Amino acid sequence: MRTIIVSLLVLCMSYGAMAQGYAVEGKVTDVHGLPLAFVPVYVKGTTNGTIANEVGVYKLRLQPGTYTVVFRVIGYEQQTEQVVIVDQNVKLNMKLEPESYTLESYLPQDTEVDSTYIIMQKVIAKRKFYLNQVKEYSCQVYLKADQKLLNAPQTFLKEDVAKVLNLDPNRRGIISLFESVSQFNVRKPGKVKEVMLGLKAAGGENPFGFNRATDLQVNLYENLLSWGGMSMRSYVSPIADNALRFYHYRLLQRFTDDDKTIDVIEVKPRHENEHVFHGVIYVIENDWRLYSADLHLYKRAHIDFVDTLNIREQYIPVRDSIWMPLSLNFSFTGKILGFKYVGYFLGVVNNYNIEPDFKPGYFNGEVFEVGKNINKKDSVFWNNYRAVPLLDDEKRYYHLFEAAEKKNNANHARDSVKSNNNKFRLIPYVLKNYKYHDPFKKITISVPSPTKVVFYNTVEGASVDIKPQFFKEYDRNKTLTVEPEARYGSSNKIFTFNTYVNYRYNPLKQGAVYGSFGSDFLDLNNSGTLSLFLNSLSTLFTGNNYLKLYKAEFASAGTQGEICNGILLNGQIEYAQRETVINTTLFAIGKDSTQLTSNDPRNPHPNPLDPNSNVPLFPNHVALSIRGSATITFNQQYTINPDGKFIEPTKYPRLRVNYRKGIPRFGSVVDYDFLSADFFQDQLKCGIYGYASYFISAGKFFNSKNLYYPDYKQFRGGQSFFFDSSLGSFHFLDYYTYSTDKRYFEAHYEHNFAGFFLGKLPYIRSLNIEEIIGGSFLTQELLPGYKEYYVGLKRSIVRLDYGFSYGRNLPVLQGFRFTYNF
């Protein structure tokens, strides 16, 4: 609440101050009168600035007074002009002269290289000082993103669809437009808090997900730069500690800005196809700090979704000895499946305060706060806070989008809108599911695809499993999810029905209550094996019925919620009647039915002549159990918006402690105590070498007086050609053999090099294939240790691995494993 009040006060005070000012506005062109795009314009001696739009038009709001306005852009000589504001706007057009890249007037050719590297050594030596020079600061950030479609194939983009998207007859036009204003606060190391004050968006989602100032940070004083939306690897800064290993440098020019000498230095990679930049950097001599930068990334640098990316950053003095970024411009071009597109992101920073005096506890893990109705700001707000003037086509796009929204929200249009959005489309339904969405009642009904409805296994035969989902959203973003499930097997003639209910009552604390009741066939491996669909394919076409089942009638209830930031508690109680089941059919296509195994994983091939061979895996029984877990996320960071609390990806590991107990009461016969701990981290960044993931788990049954196979500790095995690539899964482990009621230890490690090696190979580098290596280990008290190693290739949603497994007294297994993820 305190944050909200402070933000509102800051907003109201600055709103009023800006509303009383006047504008210095005009157009920036070259000497031929052609407009110059994205030229930074700022007031000397202040942190107030802006940037010109695509056609060179700028607008800078100032209070009455006398100012020196500076026009500075890479490739052109800096120009200044004094303006006096009394009681009206001031028109100021500016022509910029191109810089002349020559050294002949002052630098002998044979000293050029040595001189450049001496300069760069001094710049690199000062990198760490400037990285940590300002310990904390606050500022205001205006962000704008514009994405345009230049061309699209008629096959994919029909004329009626193009019309709905407001594209011209040639299928060109804006497809996404986004603006925001935020208060941005930083305390080093690693503390960030952004409060969004205004938001205006139209069209599709922002490319790369750059929806906030935090996502668009470019600090060349860092050794490595990374943007998750473009590549999983990091890019080496031209002034990194080890930059001389990656770059060639050449001094192009020197010029003077006031009393400072600026060196213009060309940056070129020593080796193409690495995660490095091309371009120029501007360096202030003697200070050895950055003045500006104009850098480029190309497709061969392993960027995703775009072919070229240009990054321009301009610094200005906040104080004599402190310079901070004024503007940042990401411009990109791309082509995929015949679609050609261009776009840009602009960031303009104003009102730096390098002595903000943050209150104790201000940085509490919340990195991004979005309040209600920030997308409802009126034209007065945007006239005062919009740092970059809109183009005519951008104004038109906003107008068309807002008109369409009003039409959609009108009562008379509700039925037609729902009918259009909820049309049944066969291919999307087969691949995923069908969704009916009513945005006015905030209801969504999802019907599963045929691949999840129809299945086959040896226990139930050809079967159907219908599991629709009902989702309802209430005020304050509380939600209700109901999932009824009806299942029937044609071979065993058994009908089961159950319902799962989840009510999220406190989105900010991840608070929810949930429960389920009914009957179902459940996997004997409680960690999961194959989906019903993949098991059907495996059983019918390869004769491998990996999935083993038991029947349960149950009722359960649970709750979860955070007791403080980073500690999530979860607790559940369950009462279940469990029954063993057997195969009722051994049908397989083109396979000998004798290859199919029994439903008992411990006795896959029973001897019909041996009466002891047909003993059930466990007797029918009642089980009452409780379970709880505490998940600790170290230094957890999160976003708060009207939809709730969302946990940010973390560079720190997580710890989860689990406890489960069987209670011999109320007819229950189970009696055990199980405790385990999981230590894991997903996508740990490793700079230019990609990222790593690991999962370590250990546990023990401290009491095992009476428990049955469904109570054992199970592991995520991998006997099928299709495997689960999630963290903590095995590639070749038998799904059930290592299940245990004793102590255990398992460890998994995987490293994705994100193209570090293959990116150096001709012809192959253009495929953007990622290399993967990994391994797993498992030991438990009764069986020998199990090990496996693998290598893999990944491209987008498809991944293929090859590996092998072994252990003492265990046969060596090897083969391929495949996974995909839509």
Image (spheres, grey):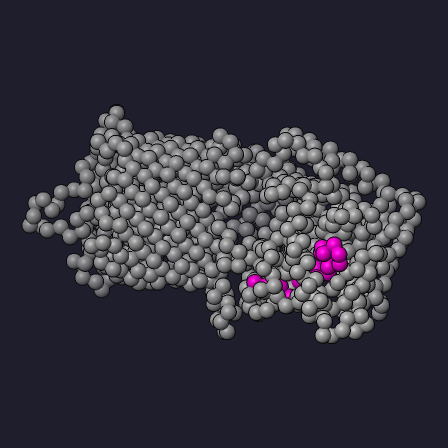
Is 182 left, or right, of 190 in this rendering? right
Magenta stretch, main secondary structure class: strand
- Dividing the picture into quadrants, the one containing residue 234 is bottom right
Asked if one can make out residue 411 in the rendered structure from this viewpoint, the answer is no
Residue farthest toward the top in the current orientation of the protein: 666
Counting from the top left corner in percent of width and height, residue 236 is at: 59, 59
- Dividing the picture into quadrants, the one containing residue 497 is top left
Indicate the quadrant containing the C terminus: top left, top right, bottom left or bottom right.
Answer: bottom left
Magenta region: which residues?
275-295
Using the image as rendered, state which of residue 681 and residue 642 is in the foreground: 681
Using the image as rendered, state which of residue 353 and residue 795 is in the foreground: 353
Is 710 left, or right, of 750 in this rendering? left
Asked if one can make out residue 568 in the rendered structure from this viewpoint, the answer is yes
Looking at the image, residue 438 lies above or below residue 98 = above
Indicate the quadrant containing the N terminus: top left, top right, bottom left or bottom right.
Answer: top right
Using the image as rendered, state which of residue 700 and residue 53 is in the foreground: 700
For the image shown, how many numbered marks are present on the structure?
Answer: 0
Q: Residue at x 68, y 58 (%)?
A: 122
Using the image as rendered, state which of residue 168 and residue 413 is in the foreground: 168
Counting from the top left corner in percent of width and height, residue 563 is at: 49, 30
Is 504 left, or right, of 164 in this rendering? left
Residue farthest toward the left in the current orientation of the protein: 609
Q: Residue at x 22, y 54 (%)?
A: 808
Counting from the top left corner in percent of width and height, residue 579 is at: 22, 38
Asked if residue 290 is among those painted magenta in the image, a careful observer would answer yes
Q: Residue at x 40, y 62 (%)?
A: 792
Asked if residue 122 is among those painted magenta in the image, a careful observer would answer no
Counting from the top left corner in percent of width and height, residue 337 is at: 55, 67
Q: Residue at x 70, y 59 (%)?
A: 293
